[in-house]
């Protein structure tokens, strides 16, 4: 039986990176030090991260950021945009979506549900979906390619670039029939914090860097230390081994991938595509933090930055609570080592992690809850330059 790639995890198998069967030749991926960019005034790429970046301002019709934007990455769940478009393509003029398909498409777009993607990939021809999208000039794909022939069942191995991702959003927003545009974008605006299949916290990158309005489709694939969301811990995703075929236009199937894509600002003003690869063994929290820092560095017209101060955290699966006490309802648990935005702080229950004790709690506006300051990377119990809740900012 053919196995289908589950978007958050590559197969636990030996995989050869083979030449791709369609699409233009890709630029090689290059690792760039922080602050070193190609054709960009702002993008800061953390050390050890390989990135393809494209930011397009629809109001002016210009790119504000371009960093290796034609380089191919394995798409992971970003390809779900193409799966949805292919399904909806010939359903006009009314574009009525059967109830069974609506029940699949909505969680696929909002929560990145993999079972839904498996259904559409296996039912509608797998790689033939990618070929159909490539053959549609109105979409304007140049670098996208179907998975290597020997991995035709793995939808997450579809190759995409940052500029092709921008092209997909431009098609949806500017050319697609209104019912298609409304259905896809409304679901992306309702992106859930927890992914439907893996319980990964998927509000990284665009979703964590800007206040609403935004719409996002995220992607991740590879071996991470635990990532989690809600009350469930997520087992580590597995990664594949690979060796590039000589002379092939290859896509890296080894390193952990984390992608953030979507629109930011009123009327979906700016399209953002940030595709990244991280060093083997990178924790989900570190990758989450790195892609957040990169995304926040970008010139995104119309984007509103959330107020507060960013801090690193330590500890495994730190609880975010409704109030500043360990008995209060748990909202979620943080990926280990993730960076968080602190809006204010308040005194609450004393927490002890020997040899430390702390009665200060930080309010995290993006989660709507509190964590003990004992888990925030700061030398003092009371965080510097962070106001008490209810007080004006200093």
Image: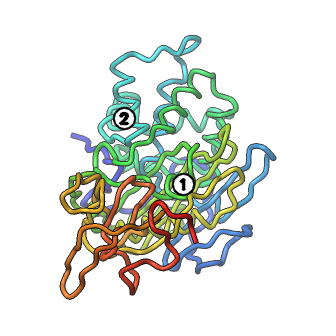
* Sequence-earlier tag: 2 or 1: 2
Vertical placement of residue 196 versus 240, above or below: above
Q: Nearer the viewer, residue 168 or 109?
A: 109
Quarter of the N terminus within the rendering: top left
Asked where in the image residue 175 lies, by quadrant, the reply is top right
Q: Is residue 260 left or right of residue 237?
A: right
Task: Give the mark count.
Answer: 2
Circle 1 SS class = helix
Q: Residues within 10 Å of mark 2 (few under 14, many from 20)?
A: many
* Residue 229 in sight from this viewpoint: no
Q: Which mark, by number, is residue 198? A: none
Q: Nearer the viewer, residue 200 or 67?
A: 200
Residue occupying the point 24% across, 70% down:
316
Residue assigned mark 2: 107
- Work out which residue is located at the far top of the displayed protein and give it: 94
Asked where in the image residue 381 lies, by quadrant, the reply is bottom left
Residue occupying the point 24% across, 81% down:
357
* Residue 192 in sight from this viewpoint: yes
Residue assigned mark 1: 206
Q: Is residue 366 left or right of residue 332?
A: right
- Of badges 2 and 1, the one in the foreground is 1
Question: Residue 364 placed where, x, y %?
Answer: 41, 60
Vertical placement of residue 320 versus 122, above or below: below
Circle 2 SS class = helix
Q: Pointers 2 and 1 in contact (CB under 8 A)?
A: no
Quarter of the C terminus within the rendering: bottom right
Question: Residue 300 placed where, x, y %?
Answer: 68, 56
Residue occupying the point 50% across, 65% down:
291
Question: Residue 236 placed where, x, y %?
Answer: 24, 63
């Amino acid at each position: 039986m053919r196995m289908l790639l589950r978007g958050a995890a590559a197969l636990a198998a030996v995989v050869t990176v083979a030449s791709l069967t369609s699409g233009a030749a890709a630029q090689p991926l290059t690792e760039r030090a922080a602050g070193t960019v190609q054709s960009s005034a702002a993008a800061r790429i953390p050390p050890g991260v390989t990135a393809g970046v494209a930011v397009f301002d629809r109001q002016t019709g210009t790119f504000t950021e371009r960093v290796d934007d034609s380089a191919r990455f394995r798409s992971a769940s970003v390809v779900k945009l193409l799966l949805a478009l292919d399904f909806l393509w010939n359903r006009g003029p009314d574009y009525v979506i059967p109830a069974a398909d609506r029940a699949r498409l909505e969680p696929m777009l909002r929560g990145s549900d993999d079972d839904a993607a498996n259904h559409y990939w296996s039912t509608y021809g797998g790689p033939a979906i990618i070929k159909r999208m490539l053959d549609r000039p109105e979409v304007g794909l140049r670098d996208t390619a179907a998975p290597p022939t020997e991995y035709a069942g793995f939808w997450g191995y579809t190759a995409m670039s940052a500029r092709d991702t921008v092209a997909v959003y431009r098609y949806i927003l500017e050319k697609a029939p209104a019912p298609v545009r409304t259905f896809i974008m409304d679901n992306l605006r309702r992106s859930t914090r927890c992914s439907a299949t893996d319980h990964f916290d998927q509000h990284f990158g665009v979703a964590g860097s800007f206040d609403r309005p935004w719409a996002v489709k995220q992607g991740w694939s590879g071996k991470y230390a635990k990532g989690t969301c809600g009350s469930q811990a997520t087992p580590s995703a597995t990664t594949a081994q690979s060796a590039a075929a000589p002379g092939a236009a290859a896509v890296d199937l080894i390193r952990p991938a984390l992608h953030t894509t979507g629109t930011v600002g009123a009327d979906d003003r700016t399209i953002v595509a940030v595709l990244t690869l991280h060093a083997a063994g990178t924790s989900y929290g570190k990758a989450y933090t790195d892609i957040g820092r990169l995304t926040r560095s970008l010139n995104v017209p119309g984007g509103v930055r959330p107020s507060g101060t960013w801090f690193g955290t330590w500890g495994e699966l730190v609880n975010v609570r409704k109030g500043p006490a360990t008995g209060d309802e748990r909202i979620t648990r943080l990926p280990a080592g993730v960076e968080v935005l602190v809006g204010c702080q308040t005194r609450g229950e004393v927490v002890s992690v020997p040899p430390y004790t702390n009665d200060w709690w930080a309010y995290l506006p993006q989660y709507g809850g509190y964590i003990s300051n004992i888990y925030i990377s700061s030398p003092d119990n009371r965080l510097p330059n962070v106001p008490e809740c209810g007080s004006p900012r200093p």
